[in-house]
Image (cartoon, coloured by chain):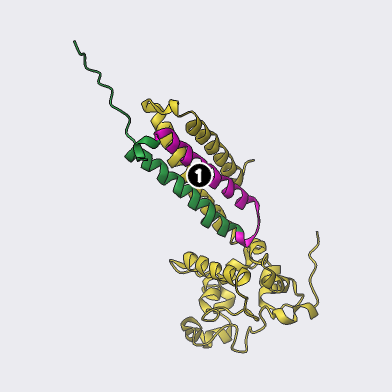
Amino acid sequence: MSLRTIGLRRYLQVSGILIILGLVVELFSLIWFHPLAFVLFAFLGASMMGLGMIVYLASIVFISEPRVDRRSTN
Amino acid sequence: MFGPSALLYALIGLTIVLIATVAFRPAITTGAAGKILAFTALFLLPALCVAAGVSAHMERSHETRFCISCHSMENYGKSLYVDDPHYIPAAHFQNHRVPADSACNACHADYSVYGNLKDKMVGMKRVYMQFVSKPPNPIRIEGGFKNNQCLHCHLGARSFEEGPTHQTMMDSLKSGDVSCISSGCHDTVHNAAQVDQQKMWRPAQ
């Protein structure tokens, strides 16, 4: 399956879910007062958000919408 | 009314709502405004949340209660309450010579240019020792306690500079040839192993 066929919709969803999970981990790490909270945030939360952002940027680069030819055809 | 933490929580909440909107209703991203919204929701705001999260965790790691939340640091935390002015950390903590809520950081921070970063690396190593390997007993500071950490505050202070003992050895103190805490002068520091046998100060509520 090529990158184009996967579609922008799927890319946005995967990216969105990864970032939301990362944000939930960040929220939990901020509430949890423990030395491991930073480790959790840095290695799990920030990594998930970073990956989600990369997926989104990849969707901009690899998935291009078909151009609409606005010129008149008559 | 709202502290930095509340703002960060609000930012995270807003980001989650925007991401959910963009990711599950991708039709709104077809126009130029929708694309800007998607870029904001899926890149700019998450990047801001990561930066703000790092900053919040860094700030929190300066707190005294954070340092003593590890089991192996418990006695070091107790030593701040020893009722004996010869205990250097206790005397500083109890008399607010250092901010009580960031007492550990005030005396143990590396005040050099990249000191904060170095401190965090050492902190990560200690977290590893606490949760994966085994913390040393007694806990030792790598390279020993540096005079610069005392001099950061005391240098230039009248009571320190005019002290006859300090005057005679000022150059050695500055160069680190003579240690403030292990040269027979201010050598009662945490003494964590014996802290349970000491009389403790109980602050009035």
Residue B194 point in image, percent of width and height: 75, 82
Q: Is residue A69 above or below residue B117?
A: above
Q: In this view, which residue lies farthest toward the top?
A: A74
Towards the viewer: A16 or B128: A16
Chain colored yellow: B
Instruction: Identify the residue at image location x=61%, y=61%.
Output: A36
Q: Is residue A63 above or below residue B25?
A: below
Query: Quadrant where the C terminus of chain B lies?
Result: bottom right
Q: In the picture provided, is A6 more to the left or to the right than A48?
A: left
Q: Secondary structure at mark 1?
A: helix
Give the dominant element type of the magenta stretch: helix, strand or loop.
Answer: helix
Q: How many marks?
A: 1
Q: Which residues are magenta?
A: A7-36
Give the amino acid type for the residue marked by disc 1 in the picture. Leu
Task: Say if the magenta span includes residue A38.
Answer: no
Task: Say if the magenta span includes residue A18.
Answer: yes
What residue is shown with label 1? A18
Chain colored green: A
Residue B204 point in image, percent of width and height: 81, 62
